[in-house]
Image (cartoon, rainbow, N blue to C red):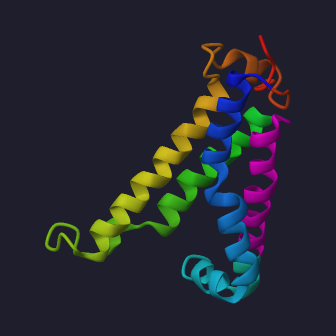
Amino acid sequence: MNAHAIATLIVRLGLVMLFMPFSALDKIFGFNHALGQTQEVFKPRSLAAFVLLCGLAIEVLCSFGVVTGLADRACALVLAGYCAATAVLYKRFWAQGDFWSRPDGKGRSLFWDFLKNLSLGAGFLVIVVGADGSGLLPFLDAPFASSHPYSSN
């Protein structure tokens, strides 16, 4: 493995480490707590459990795809959407009512978390469009193909 491949692996591991293993394990070992958080947005317990399990599957399967290069662009696109969706659904800084009045309030704290989610999603979009300058066309031509991130080209 050359230096480029090692750097690519480290960057991709850095992008997914929030999800796999940390968030995924937190959902598994703290399922009832995670379910309670999900029910704050999706009230029926069965719907919340379904959404939570879908999120767990996205975190595990798409993280695996990004790191291994298997359908990595499609997986990165799903993770980018997941980051945006979780930002809008769970980091609702605008709903706290204290964003402008309290610098140490919950709204301000959620605002930074909201931006972090969007920034992480943007990192995944770099994989989708190709950090090598290849653009969106390779993804549109074959969305489930590998970008071959570890090849020595």
Number of disc labels = 0
Locate residue 105, reporting x and y percent: 25, 76
Q: Residue furthest left?
A: 101
Where does the C terminus fall, quadrant-wise?
A: top right
Stretch of the chain drawn in magenta: 50-71
x and y, in percent, of residue 131 in the image:
60, 22
Q: Main secondary structure of the magenta part?
A: helix
- The image quadrant where one finds the N terminus is top right
Image spot of residue 147 (x, y percent): 78, 24
Residue 44 magenta-highlighted: no
Residue lying farthest front?
2
The residue positioned 69% from the left and 40% from the top of the image is 76
Image point 84% across, 32% down: which residue? Answer: 144
From where the camera sits, is residue 76 visible? yes
Q: Is residue 133 above or below residue 119?
A: above
Q: Is residue 47 visible?
A: no
Q: Which residue is rendered at x = 80% and y = 48% of the image? A: 64
Q: Quadrant of residue 25?
A: bottom right
Which picture quadrant has residue 39?
bottom right
- In the image, residue 91 above or below residue 41: above
Give the percent coordinates (x, y) of residue 118: 47, 48
- The image quarter containing residue 77 is top right
Residue 52 inside the magenta-drawn segment = yes
